Image (spheres, helix red, strand yellow):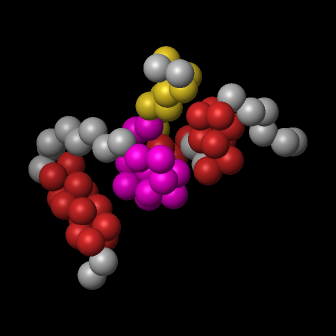
Amino acid sequence: MPPGDAIHQLVRDLAEQGMAICLTSSDLDELLEVANRIVCMRGGRQVAAGLADSFDELTLLSLVTGAQAAA
């Protein structure tokens, strides 16, 4: 098992036990895979927050860079 998979499983197990986990990552796929909720910050300010299911990679990338997503 790759080290990242073991860490992700540990995070899931602890969350299932009711523990709050704060995970910081620039890997958007990792956040979407592991997180229950996402708080997106840019320039030290919160720009979005919500359930992870309400975000996709393009939306997160747009939020963190300040770019507009193409329609």
Residue at the (24%, 62%) spot, across then down: 7
Q: Which residue occupies the foreground of this view, 42 or 52?
A: 42
Question: Residue 42 location in percent, x, y?
Answer: 54, 26
Residue at the (49%, 27%) spot, across then down: 41
Whether residue 16 is visible: no
Quick check: 29 left or right of 60? Answer: left
Q: Which residue occupies the foreground of this view, 3 or 60?
A: 3
Question: Residue 12 location in percent, x, y?
Answer: 25, 57
Q: Which residue, as the protein is rendered here, is positioned at the far bottom?
A: 1
- Is 47 part of what is drawn in magenta? no
Question: Residue 33 location in percent, x, y?
Answer: 44, 58
**Which quadrant of the figure has residue 8?**
bottom left
For the N terminus, the image quarter is bottom left
Quick check: 48 left or right of 65? Answer: left
Q: Which residue occupies the foreground of this view, 3 or 17?
A: 3
**Which quadrant of the figure has residue 10?**
bottom left
Q: Which residue occupies the foreground of this view, 52 or 43?
A: 43
- Is 35 part of what is drawn in magenta? yes
The magenta stretch is 25-38
Q: Which residue, as the protein is rendered here, is positioned at the far top?
A: 45
Residue at the (15%, 43%) spot, across then down: 18
Above or below 42: residue 24: below
Question: Residue 45 location in percent, x, y?
Answer: 49, 18
Residue at the (21%, 49%) spot, across then down: 15
Whether residue 20 is visible: yes
For the C terminus, the image quarter is top right
Q: Which residue, as the protein is rendered here, is positioned at the far front?
A: 43
**Which quadrant of the figure has residue 65?**
top right
Above or below 27: residue 19: above
